[in-house]
Image (spheres, rainbow, N blue to C red):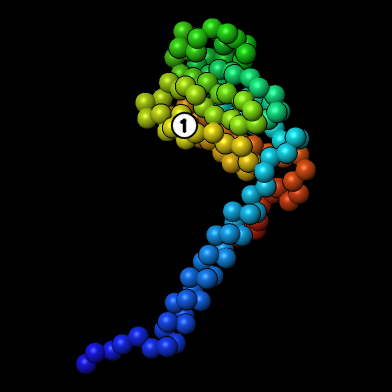
Amino acid sequence: MKQYLRKADIILFIALVLIGLAASVALSMSRSAAGSDARVIIESGGKLYATYPLNEDRTLVVPAPKQSSADAPAPDSDAPASSQYDYYNVVEIKDGHVSVTEASCKNQVCVRHGEISRSGETIVCLPNRLVVRIENDTEEGGGYDSVTS
């Protein structure tokens, strides 16, 4: 016995598609563009490494925590990263965008990730334990959405 789509099935399908589209539009609009007070937060090994304004161009070498920080040169050193550290990431802030342009990790996912420019976006390098994210000072409710037990 063949069973064909009923009118209610078609209406339900269209309603679900519309709800999905509305949700994706709402999520894409909820990400705020980074303003002039946006800052780049760089963490290495789970600890805060540096914070820089997003609107100031700079390139810096971030050593991975596998490297001893006692013999690490200053973050803005001009020497090539490959000659300074065994494990490193090069983070570039330029024209309101942030990217990892070079890394010592094998898979290079952080480099291929590309640029980020909006508040809440993140670049992660798991092998080198690096997290680069953008935050806005004016954001409210930056904590948890909810907590469950």
Residue 80 image position (x, y, % from top left): 50, 9
User: Does 58 appear above or below 48?
Assistant: above
Residue 88 lies, in percent from the top left, at 49, 19
Query: Which quadrant would the N terminus be assigned to in this image?
Result: bottom left
The quarter in which the C terminus is drawn is bottom right
Is residue 32 left or right of 129 when viewed as pictured? right
Compared to residue 147, the image places residue 100 above or below, namely: above
Residue for badge 1:
110
Please give left or right for residue 3 compared with residue 129 in the image. Answer: left
Q: Position of residue 121 (x, y in %)?
A: 59, 41
What residue is rendered at 74% in x and 46% in y?
139
Residue 120, picture quadrant: top right
Please tell me which residue is depicted at 70% across the width and 24% down the height of the picture. 56
Residue 124 at least partly seen: yes
Q: Residues within 10 Å of mark 1 (few under 14, many from 20)?
A: many
**Left or right: residue 6 compared with residue 88:** left
Q: Secondary structure at mark 1?
A: helix
Identity of the residue drawn at 49% across and 33% down:
114
Q: Position of residue 41 (x, y in %)?
A: 65, 31
Residue sitting at x 65%, y 31%: 96
Furthest toward the bottom, the residue is 1
In the depicted view, which residue is nearer to us: 85 or 16?
Answer: 16
Residue type, numbered disc 1: Cys
- Residue projecting furthest to the left: 1
How many marks on residues? 1
In the shown orientation, is residue 47 left or right of residue 136?
Answer: left
Residue 69's quadrant in the figure?
Answer: top right
Up-down relation of residue 4 to residue 57 (above or below):
below
